[in-house]
Image (tube, rainbow, N blue to C red):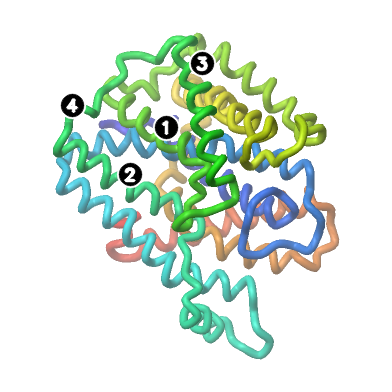
């Protein structure tokens, strides 16, 4: 299958957004991260990260399902699984046992102790975690399940002949929101099970499956304006009311989960926002924006490497800029720019090493 420049551009931009999202946490945005500046939470950045969270990782799962179907159809289950264990398993192990303790050591130095020694100390203390590569860990699980179903129950893997109509999408989004609300009664946002925030996973699972089903008729590159004219305005409206709702909650109870109206609002808000943004991005980049795609095409091979290596680079940049007296917005923009540029340069260098392209 010929690569689509629009989807490659989306992958690059989503990867950049992951970096910016984590930089935002440094300066008061919502979420957990290795190192944060000692300043209060920033309401604008909390809203920014909440909007990001509604769609960007789900978008990755949609694309992953799409290309997984292409890969398994072309290679068969055995070669597909071998390829997944190489391209997902090796980076996951490298991050878990090397990059993770290194990043933690970088974020929590010890006076008079070298970074290498501190990293070894973190490793000896079993400070291992997948960090942002929880996505890779999840995708490895999804890939194994896809291979099992493909091999033993191939009739379960169907295909979509066209983009569903408005009513079907609406009912799907409402059902997804209800399922998410139910899951968060038991596992609220912020709580992890084996490093995974399962409160977000109903959407991830649905989008991965949709990606698998959408591949055969290349639906991700067949979005028309009629498919977005309802969902984009809805997404914009919901995003615009989010700050008001966050500032004026719908009664008592956290948005992260529980039997309350705030949690119900958040669980329903997310899929509708994701739908509008994802469909609109696919339409814009795969149908309309050929010149912009040409600009980002050279960065496409670097996207996966950038995703893997960005945590220590963001931490190092953040610590370096810590004493710089500037407003949050300026530091966010400068930090993001430096971090992304450094990630691009380092990823380009890593890809020049022998055998690395087989993995990345």
Q: Determine the secondary structure under disc 4.
A: helix
Q: Nearer the viewer, mark 1 or mark 4?
A: 4
Q: Nearer the viewer, mark 3 or mark 1?
A: 3
- Mark 1 or 4 closer to N-term? 4
- Mark 2 or 4 closer to N-term? 2
Kindly identify which residue carries mark 2: 142
Residue nearest the observer in this picture, 176 or 157: 176
Q: Is residue 60 left or right of residue 75?
A: right
* Residue 9 appearing in the image: no
**Residue shown at 16% from the left, 48% from the top:** 79
Kindly identify which residue carries mark 4: 155
Label 1 packing within 10 angstroms: few (<14), some (14-19), many (20+): many
Quadrant assignment for the N terminus: top left
Q: Determine the secondary structure under disc 1.
A: helix
User: Against 20, is 222 above or below?
Assistant: above
Residue nearest the observer in this picture, 324 or 344: 324
Q: Is residue 78 left or right of residue 287?
A: left
Kindly identify which residue carries mark 1: 207
């Amino acid at each position: 299958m010929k690569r689509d420049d629009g989807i490659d551009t989306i992958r690059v931009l989503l990867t950049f957004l992951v970096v910016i999202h984590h930089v935002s946490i440094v300066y008061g945005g919502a979420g957990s991260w290795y190192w944060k500046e000692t300043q209060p939470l920033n309401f604008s950045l909390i809203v920014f990260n909440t909007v990001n969270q509604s769609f960007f990782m789900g978008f990755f799962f949609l694309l992953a399902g799409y290309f997984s179907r292409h890969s398994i159809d072309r290679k068969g289950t055995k070669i597909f699984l071998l390829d997944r264990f190489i391209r997902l398993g090796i980076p996951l192990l490298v991050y878990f046992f090397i990059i993770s303790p290194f990043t933690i050591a970088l974020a929590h130095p010890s006076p008079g102790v070298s970074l290498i020694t501190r990293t070894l100390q973190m490793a000896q203390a079993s400070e291992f975690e997948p960090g942002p590569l929880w996505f890779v860990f999840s995708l490895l699980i999804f890939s194994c399940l896809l291979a099992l179903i493909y091999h033993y129950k191939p009739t379960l893997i169907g295909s979509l002949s066209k983009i569903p109509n408005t009513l079907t999408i609406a009912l799907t989004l409402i059902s997804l929101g209800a399922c998410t609300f139910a899951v968060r009664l038991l596992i609220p946002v912020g709580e992890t099970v084996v490093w995974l925030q399962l409160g977000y996973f109903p959407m991830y699972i649905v989008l991965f499956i949709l990606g698998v089903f959408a591949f055969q008729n290349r639906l991700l590159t067949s979005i028309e304006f009629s498919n977005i004219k309802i969902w984009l305005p809805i997404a914009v409206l919901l995003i615009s009311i989010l700050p008001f709702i966050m500032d004026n909650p719908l009664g008592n109870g956290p948005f992260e989960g529980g039997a309350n109206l705030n949690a119900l609002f958040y669980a329903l808000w997310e899929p509708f926002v994701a739908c509008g943004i994802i469909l609109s991005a696919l339409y814009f980049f795969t149908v309309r924006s050929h010149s912009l795609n040409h600009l980002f095409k050279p960065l496409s091979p670097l996207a996966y490497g950038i995703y893997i290596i960005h945590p220590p680079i963001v931490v190092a940049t953040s610590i370096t800029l810590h004493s710089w007296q500037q407003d949050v917005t300026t530091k966010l923009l400068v930090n993001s720019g430096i971090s992304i540029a450094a990630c691009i340069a380092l990823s380009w260098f890593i890809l020049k090493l022998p055998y690395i392209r087989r993995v990345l």
